[in-house]
Amino acid sequence: MTMETITAIKESGQYLTFQLGDELFAFDVLRTNEVLEVTQVTRIPGANDAMIGVINLRGSVVPVIDLRKRLNMPQKERTVDTSIIIIDTDYGDEKITLGVLVDAAKQVIMLDKTQLEPPPKVGMKMNIEYITAIGKHDNNFIILLNSDRIFSEKELIAAVEVRDVQE
């Protein structure tokens, strides 16, 4: 991935940061709708492991994916900081709204292209296709996730099916 690719992918320059374990991650703010406290999540029988269920968001059913499970990270107990970030992702020509369970939502930060680098091709525990870039902010590295690539086709199909059942 070249800097031109990063520039083309980068949409707003603003990112909502969140924590999973000791790592900082972020989604582009143009893809995020809101941050919620963890509410009642209703399990869906037969859903894949990462999809922990659905929530009622102002009358709409929104699937929730545990990002720790999606990234094969060890599970940990939920705390008062555990949050659900509501994001939009593209699947084909459809926009899908998902809830993403994270350890803690942090803040919105600005990053310009001088603070972004391509992900390293070696030494990464996660698929680099999931990563838009690595950002540098206040002496911290932030993994910028690609909301269109991080979720599996199976998860997105399930999200579409859940959405279509409610309509």
Image: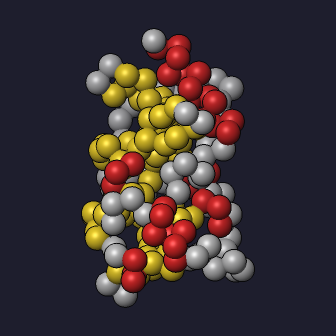
Q: Is residue 26 left or right of residue 59?
A: right
Q: Is residue 90 above or below residue 74?
A: above
Q: Residue at x 60, y 59 (%)?
A: 130
Comparing 29 with 107, the one in front is 29
Relative to 142, 17 lies left or right: left
Name the residue rendered at 64%, 23% in the picture. 45
| Residue that sits furthest to the right in the current view | 122
Residue 11 image point, x, y percent: 39, 59
Q: Taking the image as drawn, is residue 137 in sight? A: yes
In depth, the one of 38 and 95 nearer the eye is 95
Residue 7: image quadrant is: bottom left
Residue 120 place in picture, x, y as percent: 63, 79
Q: Position of residue 69 (x, y in %)?
A: 61, 51
Q: How is the image coloured?
A: secondary structure
Position in image of residue 58 (x %, y %): 29, 24
Quarter of the image for residue 33 reads top left
Residue at 40%, 77% in the rendered image: 113
Q: Quadrant of the C terminus?
A: top left
103 left or right of 162 in image: left
- Closer to the camera in the image, 44 or 113: 113
* Residue 133 showing in the rendered view: no
